Image: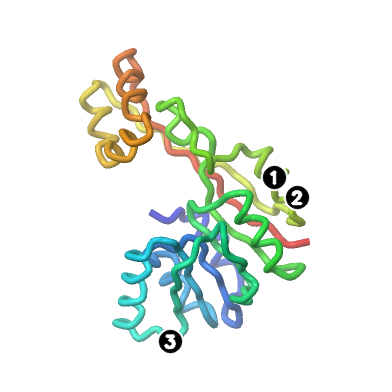
Amino acid sequence: MLSPKFLALLEAEDLKDKVVLDVGCGAGRLAFRLAPRCRRVIGIDRDTTAIAQAQQRAAAERLANAEFSVADAEAVEYDPFAPQLIAAHLCMSDAIIARCARALAPGEYLVFVAFHVDQWQETGRPSRFAYDEARLASVLRENGFIPEHLEVEREVTRFGTVQEGLAAAAGLEDRWKADSRWQRYVEFLERGGRTLTRSHLIVKARRR
C-alpha cells in the first residue's frame, strides 16, 4: 500500500511538464499513479518479471508517457533518464541517494519512503536498507540535499496469542526463514511478545 502522506507530498508538486523517475518501481504501482499527472514517467527495477508486467499494463492501457526498463538502481546512473523529480517507494540506500544527487539539478526534488530501523524490530535484525532519522538526514545533506519533510510513519499491530502473531507475519515467513528472522520472531512470541511493527520514513528533499 502506498502511504497517503507520501502521495500527498508528490501531489503537492506540479508535475505536468516534468520527467519523473520511479526508482525500484516493481510492477509500476506508483508509476501508473503518477503517469496522468506528469509529462513522462520512467520506472526502473532489476526484477525482470515485474518490469515485464509493468510494460504489458502500459501497453494495455495505451500509456504513451510511461516507460519501464530493467536496471539495478544501485549500479546505473540516472542522468540518461534526465529526471526532474525522483520518487522511490521502499527502495532507498546511500548509493541510490548519491545517484539521485548526480542526476537532479538544484531546486529539484527527491521524494521517497524508506525503511525505518524499527521496521520488523521484533525479529531483532534491521534491514541493511533501514535508516534512523538522524542518519538519513545526514546522508541527504552530505549529498547536497536539504530535507524539507522527514517523518516516521509507524504502525504497531498487537495480538493476544502466539498463533495470532504467526498469522500476522504469514506472508513474510519464507523470506524471514531465508535470513534467520523467522526463528527470532518465533522466539520473541514465545517469550511473550505480542507486537509486529511496520515503520517507514516519509521524505521530501530538495537538491541544493
Disc on the earlier residue, 3 or 2: 3
**Marks 3,1: beta carbons within 8 A:** no
The residue that label 3 is drawn on is: 64
Horizontal side, residue 42 vs residue 138: left or right:
left
The local secondary structure at tag 2 comes to helix
Label 1: element kind: helix
Q: Would you identify the image quadrant in which residue 197 lies?
A: top left
Residue at screen point 47% across, 60% down: 24
Q: Are marks 2 and 1 in contact (CB under 8 Å)?
A: yes
Q: Position of residue 198 (x, y in %)?
A: 43, 38
Q: Position of residue 20 (x, y in %)?
A: 56, 72
- Which is nearer the N-term, disc 3 or disc 1? 3
Residue depicted at x 67% and y 39%: 135
Say which amino acid is labelled 1.
Answer: Ala
In the picture of the structure, the residue carrying the numbered disc 1 is 137
Pointer 2: what residue? 141
Q: Amino acid at mark 3?
A: Ala
Q: Nearer the viewer, residue 162 or 44?
A: 44
Q: Nearer the viewer, residue 160 or 97?
A: 97
SS at circle 3: loop
Please tell me how crowded label 1 is: few (under 14), some (14-19), or many (20+) other residues with Cα within 10 Å.
some
Q: Which residue is situated farthest in the top direction here?
A: 191
- Give the spatial CA distance, label 2 vs label 1: 6 Å
Q: Is residue 196 left or right of residue 23?
A: left
